[in-house]
Image: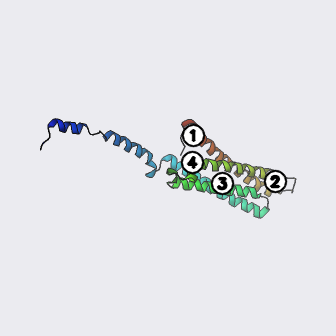
Amino acid sequence: MRLPLSALQFSFLSLPNTSGLVRKQATSTTQKMSPSGIPSLYEILQLGIRATVLVGSLAVLALMIFVRVKFVTIDTWSIAAVCWCICVDTAEVFRLLSTGRRTNVPWLSVTAMITLDLISVIFLTGAILATLFSDLSHSRVERTRAQIGWCLVVFWCQIALAGYHFMLVMLHCFHRCKYGTDLS
């Protein structure tokens, strides 16, 4: 039994035109899933910076342990602060390398990393003050020139680490306030 032509036309016309919708969904999915393929230049740059700072933090920690063993001048708070920064940078490198940042893993979220960076700034500020008023103080023990020199190196390394983590916090907060989205 053959249907009339008008009925066939009606049946085809009544089908929803999903080609545009599928194309739009595919485009948006491709844009969202671009990290699952080749990472963007920004992601590579961010990962490179974090990895470099992680290596730098490890070098600073080794320097501090060396100075503490040789001169017994580095405060324990300073070593603990740098160890904390190493943990934070390791977590961030892991977040950037893994697909966790594209899932709902709480401790791998951008908000969690901002909080950890802010805690790093607080810890490092305490370490800087401890170095300034304890390790570089002349009132307790007369320091030799070598001791003061090593303490100054550690002091400026701590300032650089604190500035880096503070810059990350400000950058993420500025991007979130201005654009309403996370930076990464």
For the residues marked 1 and 3, what is the alpha-carbon distance in whole angstroms? 23 Å
**Element at label 4:** helix
The three-letter code of the residue at mark 3 reads Cys
In percent of the image, x 14 and y 38: which residue is there?
4
The three-letter code of the residue at mark 2 reads Ser
For the residues marked 4 and 1, what is the alpha-carbon distance in whole angstroms? 10 Å
Q: x and y percent of residue 67 in the render?
A: 75, 60
The three-letter code of the residue at mark 1 reads Arg
Residues at marks 1 and 3 touching, judged by CB atoms closer than 8 Å:
no
**Element at label 3:** helix
Residues at marks 3 and 2 touching, judged by CB atoms closer than 8 Å:
no
**Mark 1 / mark 2, whichever is N-terminal:** 2
**Element at label 1:** helix
Give the answer, above or below, for where 66 lies relative to 165. below
For the residues marked 1 and 2, what is the alpha-carbon distance in whole angstroms? 39 Å
Number of the front mark, 2 or 4:
4
Which labelled disc corresponds to residue 85?
3
Which labelled disc corresponds to residue 176?
1
In percent of the image, x 47 and y 47: which residue is there?
40
Coloring scheme of the render?
A: rainbow
In percent of the image, x 63 and y 41: which residue is there?
170
For the residues marked 2 and 4, what is the alpha-carbon distance in whole angstroms? 35 Å
Report which residue position mark 4 lands on.
110
Which labelled disc corresponds to residue 87?
none
Q: Quadrant of the N terminus?
A: top left
**Mark 3 / mark 2, whichever is N-terminal:** 3
**Element at label 2:** helix
Report which residue position mark 2 lands on.
134
Q: Furthest-left residue in view? A: 1
Number of the front mark, 3 or 2:
3
